Image: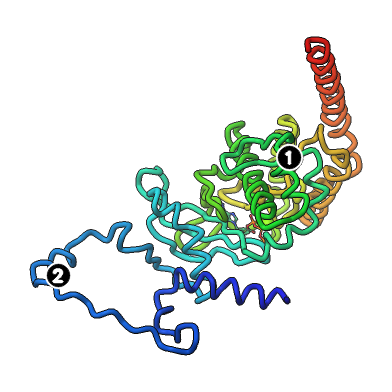
Amino acid sequence: MTDEDADGNAYFDYAEQYDPDWTERPARGGRKQQAKAAPKRSQRQIVAELAEPTGLEAGFVTSYQPARYEAVWLLDSLRMFYDEQLITDVLGQVKGGKEASVYRCAAHPTTGATLLAAKVYRPRMFRNLRNDKMYREGRSILSADGSAVKKTDHRLMRAVGKKSAFGVQVAHTSWLMYEYTTMERLFQAGAAVPRPYAAAENAILMTYFGDEQRAAPTLSEIRLPKDQAEFLFQDVMRSIKLLLEHGLIHGDLSAYNILYWQEKAVLIDFPQASDISSNSKSDFILRRDITRVCEYFIRQGVRCDPNVITRELWERYGALAEQQAALLAAEQAAMMLETDFGE
Ligand SMILES: Nc1ncnc2c1ncn2[C@@H]1O[C@H](COP(=O)(O)OP(=O)(O)OP(=O)(O)O)[C@@H](O)[C@H]1O
Ligand SMILES: [Mg+2]
């Protein structure tokens, strides 16, 4: 079956559940579904119904008019944020990508924000879970509440290994929760990243950078005056160091994943973030991030050498992480010995 078939079928499955026009289509076997005769209602009842607040029962209707296929996936993905009174409306699409689309939403007043960004992963993304092997190394599997699944949960680990439907679902939740928990950790550490508000099955709700008309541009979309470029380069380097101080490497850093807002750089797009001490490719991943960032800033007139920067950072943070990993391994071995003797 091709992807298109799979997407098409997925659409019909969703449409059957969510598409308001669905009953107008011929029912299986070619017969039209019979409309049920509506029971007669009194005038008072009708007036009372019309006066009802457009609450949750009235459904999630958005100002943004999504395309038909997008609508089913979008509304289903964001419904939880609406039901939990985090957003009141979807105002527009910020960007539609291969793997995720980001939407500008009207925030519910209780959040304290006016606008929020919702990143909705596409169904295709979860089927491929593309070249994520390198980033998964050393990661535990995260459950929907962000806690690590125990490696001793053999049923679950087997399902993930075999890529059964349940396993794919677990891997997909884990991928999304990595992005969410990484953002949470970094936001709490004071990094220039969006504040994550909530995570649903296919979506993350976070701070929106931009205004009513336009989202903040990515660095790749703008040219910087030379004096600002230097300042911003230092800003990005500070963020990279802050991540390293928390044992993290972004893993997909480039001018495409840095927003420019109010003269500051905001790092986004974290599902590939990896732990410096538990990933054996950390030095390679860090080098690639630094190289891509430097490539952009060199074009903007900043003088920087990715090799020198990577070496300095690695000496400072990588070596420390290696020591910490060795210490942790030794502690774990000692604990295992203790329990062996204790038994
Ligand atoms: N919090 C935000 N506020 C404003 N715009 C955002 C925000 N987060 C993301 N965007 C915009 O949405 C785009 C896609 O977001 P992100 O980089 O997180 O997804 P992605 O996984 O790269 O998607 P794809 O690979 O499909 O492009 C970004 O390039 C940026 O323009
Ligand atoms: Mg991106």
Say which residue appears at 62% left-offset and 39% top-offset.
181
2 or 1: mark nearer the eye: 1
Q: Position of residue 233 (x, y in %)?
A: 73, 45
Q: Which residue is mark 2?
A: 46
Can residue 216 be seen here? The reply is yes
Q: Which residue carries the number 1 mark?
A: 154
Q: Quadrant of the N terminus?
A: bottom right
Report if residue 309 is visible in the image.
Answer: no
Disc 2 residue type (three-letter): Ile
Residue 158 left/right relative to 93 = right
Assign ligand 1 to one image quadrant.
bottom right
**SS at mark 1 in the image:** helix
CA distance separating discs 2 and 1: 56 Å
Can you give x and y, in whole percent of width and height, for residue 184 in the image?
59, 38
Task: Kindly indicate whether the residue at mark 1 contacts the one at mark 2 (C-beta within 8 angstroms).
Answer: no
Task: Place residue 308 in its image quadrant.
Answer: top right
**Left or right: residue 338 compared with residue 141:** right
Image quadrant where residue 168 sits: bottom right
Percent coordinates x, y for residue 66 in the rendering: 48, 72
